[in-house]
Amino acid sequence: MSQNRLQSVSKGQEVHRANIQKSLEHRLQVARAKGDEQLIRQLEAEMTHFS
């Protein structure tokens, strides 16, 4: 694979990971606002997986 292609793939993966992280953070804020302890624990576990 060419170097440019590898860089594009790598950049795409970084953007995808950042989008997942932002989505998880938002979902965690909503869960905290609602006081949903079970969902909070689940989302925190997911965040450690993506960190």
Image (tube, grey):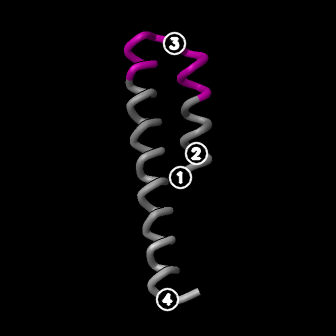
Mark with earlier residue (1, 3)? 3
Residue type at numbered disc 3:
Asp
Number of the front mark, 3 or 4: 4
**Residue holding disc 3:** 36
Mark with earlier residue (1, 4)? 4
Q: Secondary structure at mark 1?
A: loop
Mark with earlier residue (2, 4)? 4
Q: Could you say where residue 25 lies in the image, as x and y percent from the top left?
A: 41, 36
Q: Residue at x 49, y 89 (%)?
A: 3
As drawn, is 23 to the left or to the right of 40?
A: left
Q: Rounded to the nearest whole Å, what is the CA distance between mark 1 and mark 4?
A: 27 Å
Mark with earlier residue (3, 4)? 4
Q: Is residue 12 above or below residue 41?
A: below
Q: Rounded to the nearest whole Å, what is the CA distance between mark 2 and mark 1?
A: 5 Å
Q: Could you say where residue 42 lies in the image, as x and y percent from the top left?
A: 61, 27
**Residue holding disc 1:** 51
Q: Is residue 48 above or below residue 23?
A: below
Q: Residues within 10 Å of mark 2 (few under 14, many from 20)?
A: few
Question: Between residues 14 and 5, which one lies in front from this camera angle?
Answer: 5
Number of the front mark, 2 or 4: 4
Q: Are marks 2 and 1 in contact (CB under 8 Å)?
A: yes
Question: Which dot marks residue 48?
Answer: 2
**Residue holding disc 4:** 3
Q: Is residue 34 magenta?
A: yes
